[in-house]
Image (cartoon, rainbow, N blue to C red):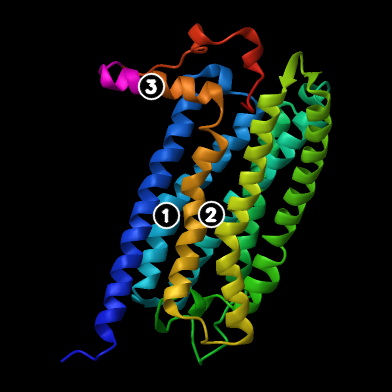
Amino acid sequence: MSSPGLEPRKHMDVVYISIEIAIAVASVLGNVLIVLVVYVNQALRDTTFSFIVSLAVADIAVGSLVIPLAIVISLGFRTQFYTCLILSSLVLTITQSSILSLLAIAIDRYLRIKIPTRYNDIVTQGRAYMAVCTCWILSILSGLVPLVGWNDLSHGNLSKSSEIVCEFKTVIRMDYMVYVNFFVCVMVPLALMIILYGEIFRVIRKQLNRRAEATCDRERYYRKELKLAKSLALVVFLFITCWMPIHIMNCVELFRPGETPKSALYVGIFMSHVNSALNPMVYAFRIKRFRLTLIQITRQCMLCKSTVATPCPTSTMDGNEKTDVNH
């Protein structure tokens, strides 16, 4: 005979797993489309799209690796301590790469608006690749911290070979999650993004007041600048909305252990994951050239034609759009 609280918990687990699977599918499909579009349209292979592809790869990994691992960990399977620690650290590494890729895109967009005439000289393709590599190296280093000693092995009379129920908070210390992962790896990028986007809004307001302003050999008209301002506001809003709940719950767990309901924890986890499924819409579906190439790919698939790399779907674009990635 099952205990009274067992069935509701099983139901909660089923709901959580179902939502996570839906998020994973949307994340993988949406971000694979981003990579495919950049592959098909050679005109999109510029510095900005280097960061967007890096973000897409990180978000594909979230959907294909992080979410399945989160589901497995939530089921509480038994394994050795370091096996569980490696899986949990992998989750930290991949999610951190997504956050740093968001920051790289914010910096890139700031430079595009702040120094449009010198942007191409400063942000070269080689430097963009170096920035992408730096994001991934920093992500790997942040994920290695628990593996080199900042973990929960010293708690609960655990040993390296002892078998445990693999749960994230069993192997990852909450003081690391709060003081390092949250305050340093999330709050610092978030603060930088707010500063960068604040400066972007200041420049955009100046442009809006003038109604039109020539930048990067083209004119930025009122409607395009208004659309860009809305996109930037949406980026900040979605980042905060998706990531803050789980980190706030980690802070609560550190200072008042055991007081976070499991249902609330589930909501926080999948909200952080859903950011990866939203990124294609925020960073790609609002870009005109991306939409045109996506339509091209869709038509080819419907007509059962092979998709090959093309210089650009130029039938509906003029020369100025080669550098216009913001609209």
Q: In the image, which residues are magenta?
A: 298-305
Locate residue 60: give its quadrant: top left
With 310 as the anchor, is 228 left or right in this view? right
Residue sitting nearer the eye, 188 or 132: 188
Q: Residue at (70%, 41%) from the top-left corner?
A: 106
Residue bearing the label numbered 1: 65
Can residue 148 be seen at all in this image of the molecule? no
Q: Which mark is residue 297?
A: 3
- Distance in Å between CA atoms under marks 3 and 2: 29 Å
Q: How far is disc 1 from disc 2 in space, using C-alphas? A: 9 Å
The part of the image, by quadrant, that contains residue 167 is: bottom left
Task: Kindly indicate whether the residue at mark 1 contacts the one at mark 3 (C-beta within 8 angstroms).
Answer: no
**Residue drawn at (81%, 42%) of the image:** 199
Discs 3/2, front:
3
Q: Main secondary structure of the magenta part?
A: helix
**210 falls in the magenta region:** no
- Specify which label sits upstream in the sequence, 3 or 2: 2
Query: Does 141 sit above or below residue 182?
Result: above
Q: Mark 1 falls on what kind of element?
A: helix
Residue type at the position of mark 2: Ile
Give the CA distance from mark 3 to mark 1: 26 Å
How many C-alpha atoms fall within 10 Å of the one at disc 1: few (<14), some, or many (≥20)? some
Rendered location of residue 324, percent (x, y): 65, 21
**Residue 272 position within the rendered picture, expressed as x and y whole percent measured from the top left:** 52, 59
Q: Given the image, on which type of amino acid does mark 1 rest?
A: Leu
